[in-house]
Image (cartoon, rainbow, N blue to C red):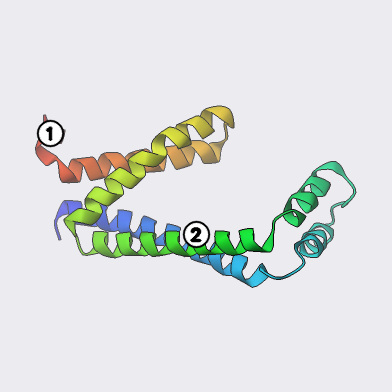
Amino acid sequence: MKHSDSGVRAVAVLEATKGLLALLVAIGLHVYAGQNLTALALELVTHLHLNPASHYPGIFISAVGSVSQSSLTLMAFGAAVYTSVRFIEAYGLWHNMRWTQWFALLSGAIYLPFELYEMIRHFSVLSVIVLLVNLVVVMYMYFVLFPRRAAI
């Protein structure tokens, strides 16, 4: 395994992890489709020992209750598609397929402006970490794809 192979495999593990998290979201959305979401949100708020009548828990309960079942199904489908894309990308990166290296570079670069905007708009440690991790992945994939340009 070359030096760049271990880095590309690290990116593959990151993409597989994102796919796994999206899979959990898709499963969760599918499980709760068809259920009374307002009752579930109320149960969660009371389980966390929060006052459902207070401002933020009330906003949460109202927002969850306003999600339609068709929207929930559509979100579950979207999360499943995202999961498939991330797993295919992780597999290709693990096996050092050139097209997935390009895909990792381009898909990561597409998110950078949105992550930068989000960090500026709602500054938090998490938004900085997400931006930095994605920036490192994009730069690394650029160096893998263009080793001569990176050395100049």
The amino acid sitting under disc 1 is Arg
In-front residue for pair 30/4: 30
The amino acid sitting under disc 2 is Gly
Is 110 situated above or below 42? above
Disc 1 crowd rating (10 Å Cα; few below 14, some 14-19, many 20+) is: few
Q: Position of residue 65 (x, y in %)?
A: 76, 56
Which quadrant would residue 19 be assigned to in this image?
bottom left
In-front residue for pair 108/34: 34
Tell which tag, 2 or 1, sits nearer the viewer.
2
In-front residue for pair 108/33: 33
The total number of labels drawn is: 2
State the SS at label 1: helix
Q: Earlier in the sequence, mark 2 or mark 1?
A: 2
Q: Position of residue 86 (x, y in %)?
A: 38, 59
Residue underneath mark 1: 149
Image point (40%, 36%), residue name: 112
Residue underneath mark 2: 78
Image point (75%, 63%), residue name: 37
Left-right relation of 127 to 140: right
